[in-house]
Image (cartoon, helix red, strand yellow):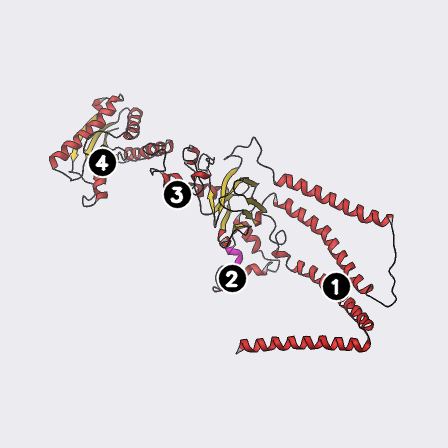
Amino acid sequence: MTSLLIILCLALIGIVVVQIGRLTELAGSIRGEGETQLEINATQGKMMLAFMVIFLPACAISALYYQDSILGYGPHTSASDHGALIDSSFNITLFFTGIVFFLTHIALFWFSYKYSGKTNAKAAFMPHDNKLELIWTAIPAIVMFYLVSDGLVTWNKVMADVPVDAVVGQDYTEIHAQGMQFAWNLRYPGPDGVLGATNYKMIDGSNPIGQDWNDIENLDDFHPSEIVLPVGKPVRVRITARDVLHNFYLPHFRVKMDAVPGMPTYFVFTPNTTTEEYRQRLGELDRNGDPKYPEWHEPADETEPDGPRRWEAFEYELACAELCGKGHFSMRRLVKIVSEEEYEEWLENQSSYYLTTIRNTDKDPFAGQLLDTEIKARKTEFTDNLQKALSSETDKIVKLKYISYETGSAKLTALSKYELDNVVAALNKYANLTIEVAGHTDNTGSEEANLALSQARAQTVADYLTGKGIGAERLRVVGYGQLKPTDTNATEIGRENNRRTEFEILTQ
């Protein structure tokens, strides 16, 4: 029923408009076309003048009213070092174009009124005026020269790459952002501070960025779900695209660069305002204790009126500024700017993508080998366990976690030597240290066979140590078989824990 009434109303309005037009034509034919046209000219001139009086002040007033919501004004001054240059160039351009905007519109609407069609009116004939030609040529030329010069200086500063002598990881941080439909794949360098090489031909389900795993600089790189950066340190962003044109856009930092398929780009910027500092700016109070920016003190979630305010929930964001498809909206990523200490703490909690996803799979070129980082990590772990045993009054046992044997035999696997070398180093460091090398098994098989196997395995370890120059008198070799389990033998994991080699400190 409502839809029918709306249709009838629209039809009635159309009939009224048509009838008014017919009445106007009829009145014109009665009074004469010329007189009617003069009236129309006069009416339109007055309407133009009235529109100017309303339109131009409305432009100025609305700009002032909404200035706190516009980038570069109010609380939204740039959060990066170079952003101030961009905002300054925009303000200078706005100043001159604003003058032109108002002058040309005043002339447009005023001339429409003043020179509306009149009876017997004559146009002024002006064949040439050197002074006028000079004015409207020279002034725009000078203004354009200034704007182009200012813009060129700003462009060269903003688009400059890092200095050639800058050291990645020390003088600046480098990260990688790859746009795809419809997400950003982010990559950070690991402890080495260097991003590894990539190859688009290697992109697949387990390798979204196409990292070359033969490049050891890739092995510690990690893929976070958000961008976290330290305040006050330059950042160089490698920007690539996997499918169509995207755009790496950080509005609060005045960072905007296309991600072009097949053509890597970059952007360098230095964030100078942490996320928390920006929030405090948005939530600032005036002298009277009232919100300086009231709109930011509204609830962040309208369904929770007593919940966090908008300024408290504010986050920097990465967006795609290209219409790259229907899922374009989902390319939002959070950006957090934190102190150097918070950044270092965050880095420590990140895990290598290679180690967590690729390691020892069919994609791993180093499968069956130990990496330098793994060797160092295992040495640190062994040293920590040894120190705990040395300082303990009761628990003097050190489990050799990374010693293994071929199934059903006492033959050491190739990777066991790294753990055994740690034992050799410890015995060389502590000259008075004597130990009992103990072998243990699970309860699979007969007790006699397990006892013999554990004795053989312990002896194999002792033989390795003596072969490295450790005196046999410092070693006692014992096989306990299945007699001393540390876990249940009812599960595979429990049995695996029971199959172990360890040593007990006898004297130190």
Q: Do the residues labelled 3 and 2 touch (CB within 8 Å)?
A: no
Instruction: Identify the residue under disc 2.
Output: 299
Going by the numbered disc 4, the residue's amino acid type is: Arg
Going by the numbered disc 2, the residue's amino acid type is: Pro
Who's the residue at 20% across and 45% down the image?
491
Mark 2 residue element: loop
* Among numbered discs 1 and 2, the one appearing first in the sequence: 1
Mark 3 residue element: loop
Going by the numbered disc 1, the residue's amino acid type is: Met
Q: Nearer the viewer, residue 492 or 300?
A: 492
Instruction: Identify the residue under disc 1.
Output: 52
Q: Do the residues labelled 1 and 2 touch (CB within 8 Å)?
A: no
Q: Are marks 2 and 4 in contact (CB under 8 Å)?
A: no
x, y percent for residue 456? 17, 29
For the residue carrying disc 4, how many other residues have a C-alpha within 10 Å: few (<14), some (14-19), or many (20+)?
many
* Among numbered discs 1 and 3, the one appearing first in the sequence: 1
For the residue carrying disc 2, how many other residues have a C-alpha within 10 Å: few (<14), some (14-19), or many (20+)?
some
x, y percent for residue 159? 61, 40
The magenta stretch spans which residues?
299-313
